[in-house]
């Protein structure tokens, strides 16, 4: 069941769903509009191989910074984050979608699911359109749809990205067994 604006306001007012900073305008008809934070990491072209199972230094692969506005390079890939810090209760899961206007400008994001129990700012990978695109801190860029699962999750999210603030670079992958 996807939560309506009424449900979302009830979850927020009861403290079950936490959003900071909270602005009532982020609550939309069927989700939350989250705003763009100031941190970014641009994925760089590199001639060295990145081993995702043992990487230790990612500086050859990412250029990170903070800015009140960023110009995305054509076809560039970036990690961006939300201004809002959220905490989901174990009975809610989130589906992050790009806001329609930004999608119509050619920006793309992969399917992104936020697990029940997650807490932190969201780090989202975006692919830029075929032309430079300026984005400003505070822009509503992500629509987070929240859905109630049939029963509360037995093991809420407690992974490495729990509590993240700003852009968080990828963790090492676990070797297959």
Image (tube, grey):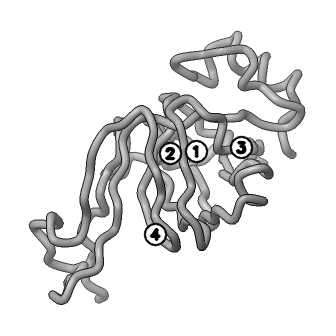
Query: Mark 1 or mark 4, which is nearer to you?
Result: 4
Q: Position of residue 61 (x, y in %)?
A: 23, 71
Q: Nearer the viewer, mark 1 or mark 3?
A: 3
Name the side, left or right, on which 160 lies relative to 19. left
Q: Which mark is residue 60?
A: none
In this figure, which residue is indicated by the disc labeled 4? 76
User: Which residue occupies 36% across, 37% down?
Assistant: 67
Tell me which label, 2 or 1, sits earlier in the chain: 1
Label 1 element class: loop
In space, the residues marked 3 and 4 are separated at their CA atoms by: 22 Å
Q: Nearer the N terminus, badge 1 or badge 3?
A: 1
Pointer 1 with pointer 3, Cβ within 8 A: no
CB-based contact (under 8 Å), mark 2 and mark 1: yes
Horizontal side of 67 relative to 103 (left or right) equals: left
Residue at mark 2: 156
Between discs 3 and 2, the one toward the N terminus? 3
Q: Residues within 10 Å of mark 2 (few under 14, many from 20)?
A: some
């Amino acid at each position: 069941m996807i939560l309506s604006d009424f449900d979302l306001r009830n979850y927020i007012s009861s403290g079950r769903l936490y959003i900071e900073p909270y602005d009532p305008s982020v609550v939309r008809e069927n989700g939350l509009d989250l705003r763009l934070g100031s941190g970014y990491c641009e994925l760089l072209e590199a001639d060295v191989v990145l081993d995702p199972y043992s990487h230790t230094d990612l500086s050859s692969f990412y250029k990170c910074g903070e800015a009140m506005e960023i110009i995305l390079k054509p076809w560039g890939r970036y990690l961006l984050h939300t201004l809002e810090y959220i905490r989901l209760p174990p009975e809610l899961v989130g589906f992050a979608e790009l806001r329609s206007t930004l999608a119509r400008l050619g920006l793309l994001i992969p399917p992104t699911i936020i697990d029940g129990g997650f807490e932190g700012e969201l780090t989202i990978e975006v692919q830029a359109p075929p032309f430079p695109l300026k984005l400003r801190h505070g822009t509503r860029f992500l629509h987070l749809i929240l859905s109630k699962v049939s029963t509360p999750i037995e093991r809420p999210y407690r992974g490495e990205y729990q509590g993240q603030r700003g852009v968080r670079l990828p963790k090492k992958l676990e070797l297959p067994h």
